[in-house]
């Protein structure tokens, strides 16, 4: 296939591009603004593959989007990963979330309409809000808690409106919490792995009993691939991970895998509006022939090993702007690197 992948230099986008270029021989153009979270280094091993092109640009810029479309003749679909993605940053500074996640998706929808392209919008379980028991399905009401999840819900509604009003061939994939190689260390699992390896504190929000539904990133990439190949226009597909786990138990597993000390764990001020539990029913995407291949125990071990072996990927992050963010957000400095 010929696909434009927006946000392909980020965590999930780069993993998706790697699978599509290597295993499906797709022609891929990555359009990415290269924000703090976007890194060419995450694509370094596939930059030379035939059929891979990179273009720096913003999804909210019609000019950049048209430039990308012009650079990939015969393009069939846009897969949109591009977003501001960190809940804590959306509480501190929500502007970019509205600009990229809402206005950016709108700009892509208009382009897809003009050029009669399919659009796969990558969304999140957070649009449903928190659920104490049971699981959300695709018809559950949207009740987002944070500016991040509200901006993603807004984008989802725009996508659905373009399908209903203009007949745009669009699908939405709502994934649960992803983890694995190339994840920026502001997120729970890589943050805890690196802090554990570097002998630093392991900051848990509140009581740490919040539950997330963990999905290994290559499993999400495979599900998105199935939706790209066989998804029905206008449909939403939930993609949940195989294992639920409380944050505190994830951190205890990371402590065990890294040989860190439990005394590094520190409970700190809770996140405002913190969702207690996420859970998705994935029956619809399973009916397309998808199922998760990597369980949490195996995925965590693989993730810790990847960060151990890829210091050259994460050390420049921890010595750059991330330090200032960390100090501002956690009220203390990183000391390790
Ligand atoms: P990420 O923060 O690692 O990467 C985001 C990428 O988008 C970066 O490469 C960044 O440079 C790019 N980007 C940001 N603003 C842009 C703009 N205006 N124009 C072009 N590119 C821009 O994100 P991620 O964790 O890989 O998430 C990817 C998508 O998946 C997001 O839409 C997110 O909402 C969704 N999602 C994430 C998770 C998760 O657990 N990480 C789970 C479900 C869904
Ligand atoms: O559920 C899917 C979502 O998962 C995606 O849509 C988001 O883009 C992605 O960032 C992620 O959101 P979360 O808020 O669930 O992920 P995060 O890694 O920030 O936090 C996971 C849990 O860990 C959450 O309950 C908050 C907690 N946490 C997080 C950090 C960074 C801590 O206790 N301490 C921390 O330092």
Image (tube, helix red, strand yellow):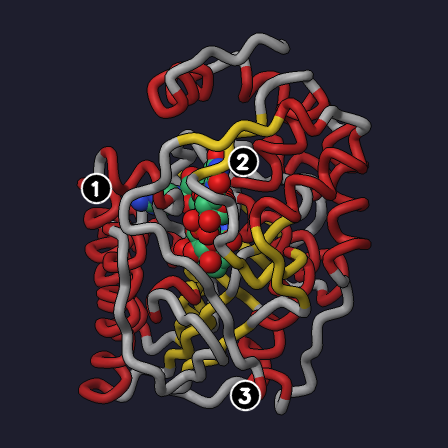
Left or right, 34 with respect to 156, comes to right
User: Gap in Å between the C-alphas at discs 2 and 3?
Assistant: 30 Å
In the image, residue 9 sits, relative to residue 177, either above or below, namely above
In the image, residue 62 sits, relative to residue 120, either above or below, namely above
Left or right, 36 with respect to 311, comes to left
Q: Which residue is drawn at 65% across and 48% down?
A: 249
In the image, residue 59 sits, relative to residue 112, either above or below, namely above
* Element on which disc 1 rests: loop
| Disc marking residue 284 | 3
Q: Which of marks 1 and 3 is nearer the N terminus?
A: 1
Q: Where the N terminus falls, by quadrant?
A: bottom right
Query: Few, some or many C-alpha atoms within 10 Å of disc 2 (few <14, some 14-19, many ≥20)?
Result: many
Evaluate whether residue 7 shows in this view: no
- Which quarter of the picture shows residue 156? bottom left
User: Gap in Å between the C-alphas at discs 1 and 3?
Assistant: 32 Å
User: Gap in Å between the C-alphas at discs 2 and 1?
Assistant: 19 Å
* Element on which disc 2 rests: loop
């Amino acid at each position: 296939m010929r696909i434009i992948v927006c946000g392909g230099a980020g965590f999930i986008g780069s993993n998706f591009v790697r699978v599509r270029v290597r295993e499906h021989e797709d022609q891929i153009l990555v359009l990415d603004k290269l924000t703090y979270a976007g890194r060419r280094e995450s694509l370094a091993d596939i930059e030379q593959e035939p059929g891979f092109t990179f273009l720096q640009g913003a999804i909210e810029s019609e000019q950049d989007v048209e430039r990308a479309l012009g650079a990939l003749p015969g393009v069939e679909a846009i897969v949109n990963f591009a977003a501001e993605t960190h809940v804590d940053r959306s509480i501190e500074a929500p502007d970019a979330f509205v600009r990229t996640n809402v206005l950016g998706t709108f700009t892509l929808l208009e382009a897809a309409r003009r050029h009669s392209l399919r659009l796969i919008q990558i969304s999140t379980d957070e649009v449903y809000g928190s659920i104490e028991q049971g699981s959300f399905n695709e018809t559950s009401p949207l009740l987002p808690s944070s500016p991040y999840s509200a901006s993603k819900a807004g984008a989802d509604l725009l996508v659905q409106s373009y399908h209903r009003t203009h007949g745009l061939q669009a699908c939405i994939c709502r994934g649960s919490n992803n983890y694995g190689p190339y994840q920026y260390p502001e997120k729970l699992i890589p943050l805890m792995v690196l802090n554990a390896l570097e002998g630093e504190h392991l900051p848990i929000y509140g009581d740490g009993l919040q539950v997330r539904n963990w999905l290994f990133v290559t499993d999400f990439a495979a599900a998105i691939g199935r939706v790209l190949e066989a998804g029905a226009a206008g449909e939403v597909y939930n993609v949940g991970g195989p294992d639920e786990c409380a944050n505190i138990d994830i951190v205890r597993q990371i402590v065990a895998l890294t040989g860190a000390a439990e005394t590094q764990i520190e409970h700190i001020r809770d996140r405002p509006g913190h969702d207690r539990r996420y859970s998705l029913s994935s029956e619809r995407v399973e009916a397309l022939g998808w199922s998760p291949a990597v369980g949490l125990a195996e995925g965590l071990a693989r993730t810790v090993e990847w960060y151990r072996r890829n210091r050259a990927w994460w050390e420049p992050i921890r010595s750059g702007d991330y330090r200032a963010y960390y100090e501002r957000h956690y009220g203390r400095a990183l000391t390790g690197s």
